[in-house]
Image: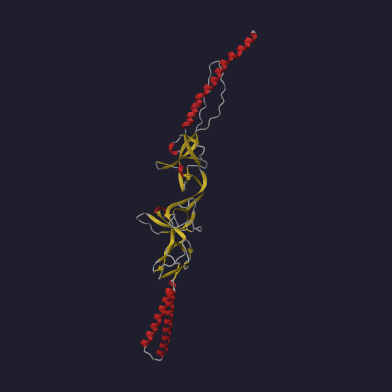
Amino acid sequence: MATTTRRLHRPISLMPLAFSMLLAACGGGQPAADKEAAAASARIPVEAAVASRAPIAASYSGTGTLEAQGETDVVSKTSGVLLKLYVEEGMRVQKGQLLAQLDDAGARASVAQSLAQMRKAEATYARAERAIKQQLIPRAEYDQDKYDLETQRAAYEGAKLQLAYTRIEAPISGVISRRMVKIGNLIQPNQALFHIVDMEPLQVTLNVPERELGTLKAGQPVKLAVDALPGEAFPGSVARIAPVVDASSGTFRVTCEFRDDTHALKPGMFGRVDVVYDQRRDALVIPRAALIEEDGETAVFVVERGAPPKPAAPAKGKPGEAVAAETKPPAAPVLVAKRRAVKIGYADGSRVEIREGLAPGDRVITIGRNAVRDGTEVQVLENAQ
């Protein structure tokens, strides 16, 4: 029985010691973990992008409204009832194409009458010409017959012209943008029947600051983006540049032309024109959002590795007591924001070229840059580039 008693009491005597060792192992690391968590929560969350090599273009951007190169009303030059319409709104027409026909019965009768009178005058003049050679008639009578012939010839040409006016033809090539009459209307002289817009090419006129006068040239490529067609870009070119600067505004006029085979562009659309005047194919670029301006200097904040955190001191037990070994993963490197002055080059939309101050692969802060200073510890969000 004594042997059994000793075996029952031995495990009980070891439990306090094991419990004290467990408490020492758990409690000894807790202050260090709290410090690490507090330090991590104090880091400023930011987003960053990587500086990389890419092509970038130097361009001037301006806004304007698309205008037709030419547009005009098609007006009647004579009177008459409208008998036929050959075109409708939206149809493309060529210069000289027949658009409508007026009643020409009266004009044809006038042509026939004028022709008969001209033939009579020709015969009279022919007799007078023979008679004047034989001195059978006075010179005045001969001159009158000659004048009558010329008058009848002019009247005949006028009658033919009035007959031609009954054919309403397109004065320019373009698109019928509006029809203002119907079949059966009585048309009067100078009355508008159609409106034609010449949309090949369409034009945008920019008022450009005079500082750009030396960079823009006729023939340079341009791109047009219009609000009505988001996501689409239409190529064009600089057609002409005004030779003078407007003294009151300090700008000069630049006319750009666009030929749209799809006919998606329409006069009156508002858009943005980018005139590309130079291009670098291997530039170091970053998002424009990374730039900061301070005291007349352009700079960025670069994400760098900071000094590694000091390891926590090992837990100490009481003299004579065993301490459990603590195995911890290595601490994550601390990231800090470092301010760097940069020299910028070309800008293209949301990107900017960096000519000095950065190297490929550098990570620059794009979101959160106003919340950090040189040396601030940061936390780069996972969705950052």
Is residue 97 positioned above or below 315 on the image?
A: below
Is 271 displayed left or right of 53 in the figure?
Answer: left
Q: Residue at x 47, y 31 (%)?
A: 41
The quadrant of the rendering that contains the N terminus is: top right
User: On the image, which quarter does residue 243 sit in?
Assistant: bottom left
- Please say whether residue 69 is visible from this viewpoint: yes
Is residue 336 positioned above or below 76 on the image?
A: above
Residue nearer the viewer, 270 or 285: 270
Q: How many marks on residues?
A: 0
Q: Where's residue 80, x and y in %?
A: 41, 71
Q: Where's residue 176, x and y in %?
A: 45, 62
Residue nearer the viewer, 108 or 12: 108
Toward the front, the furthest residue is 184
Q: Which residue is drawn at 40% across and 68% down?
A: 186
Toward the left, the furthest residue is 248
Q: Where's residue 68, x and y in %?
A: 44, 60
The image's colouring method is secondary structure
Is residue 220 positioned above or below 23 on the image?
A: below
- Please say whether residue 342 is visible from this viewpoint: no
Q: Where's residue 18, x and y in %?
A: 57, 17
Q: Which residue is drawn at 45% across and 43% down?
A: 289
Residue nearer the viewer, 266 or 80: 80
